[in-house]
Image (spheres, rainbow, N blue to C red):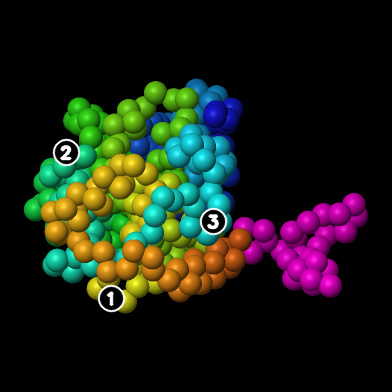
Amino acid sequence: MKVEKSSQDLENEVIYAGLCIHCGSCNAFCPHMDFNQTTGEAFVVDECAETVGLCYNSCPRSFLPIKEIEQKLFGESRIDLGVGVYKDIIQVKAKNDDILHALVEAAFKEGVIECLVLGEPNGAKPAVSFPKIVYNAKDAKKLIPQKTMDNAGPLVTGIGQAYKEYKKNIGIIANPCHLQGLAKILVSDFNTGAEKTSLKIAFACSSGGMAGCKYCTDFSGEFSDISYSPWGAPKPEALLIIRTAVGQKVVDAAKKMKLIEVTNPNPDLSEMKKFLNKKRKKNFKTLLGKSLVRAKYLDFSYDELKDILEE
């Protein structure tokens, strides 16, 4: 899966077009890209001679072949359009009311990860977090995100940093957009080192706060091993969407260590799906724009086409 486009195309089609969500995918492994140390936005460092750019092919906003990525990551395609591919969804609570930290502790103890990429907020407005690599659950505790904006920033670059440190089992807690970019890198034909990523935990997104967020349609973290959703469960409980065998291993370890407890093995998903689908519909409408379909000589708007199809 490679597209013959370069960093100049990335600038024109994504960065200058206001689609960039500052995820760090383009500059995680490409020396010709970097990010603004204040805003986190990507920029081109120098003119690259590559016609098939790693940066362009890594960006989740340049193109996103969802079905192809799902087949390569999971070996199957989604049945549930809003939630994505998954094995199980459970409702849980944690011993210390910190479910994400419980999963991290289990992952370290089980040897699934030897380091973890987290976001470290810089305190600026708008909020931006930069990647921080931690090597144990204790150091991770103070950086565990409490909301999606705690992850807002180029976190995928942390995977590249950990790879340069010769780490073999790298974990990350990130937003869905980060994991879209990371998934593209993982299933691409480029040799990057991203395959050292051993655990991907998604924080289900509440829509974010950057300009590019309004173009996103993934709110549950569809390309993760485990998705954590505080939406759809009473506080301080949450829903865990388990997507892979690795995700199941971490959840099982957390249960065995009594770090988390399953409060409902078959939770009602209606509230979570209501939240996800509302935002998906809104952002799909933004993506489609004012002119949805051109039929011969006529342009139909979203509302016009909806009225026609509902007749």
Vertical comparison of 268 with 251: above or below: below
Looking at the rendered image, the quarter that the C terminus falls into is: bottom right
Q: Badge 3 local density, few (<14 within 10 Å), some, or many (20+)?
A: few
Instruction: Determine which of the numbered discs, if any, sits on residue 235 in the image.
Output: 1
* Front-lying residue, 169 or 74: 74
State which tag comes first along the sequence, 1 or 3: 3
The amino acid pointed to by label 2 is Gly
Vertical comparison of 269 with 88: above or below: below
For disc 2, the marked residue is 111
Q: Residue at x 50, y 23 (%)?
A: 50
Q: Secondary structure at mark 2?
A: loop
Can the viewer see residue 43 in this picture?
no
The residue most toward the front is: 265
Q: Residue at x 23, y 67 (%)?
A: 93
Q: Secondary structure at mark 1?
A: loop
* Front-lying residue, 154 or 230: 230
Q: Which residues are magenta?
A: 285-311
* Front-lying residue, 173 or 259: 259
Looking at the rendered image, the quarter that the N terminus falls into is: top right
Which label sits in the foreground, 1 or 3? 3
Marks 1/3: CA distance?
Answer: 25 Å
For disc 3, the marked residue is 80
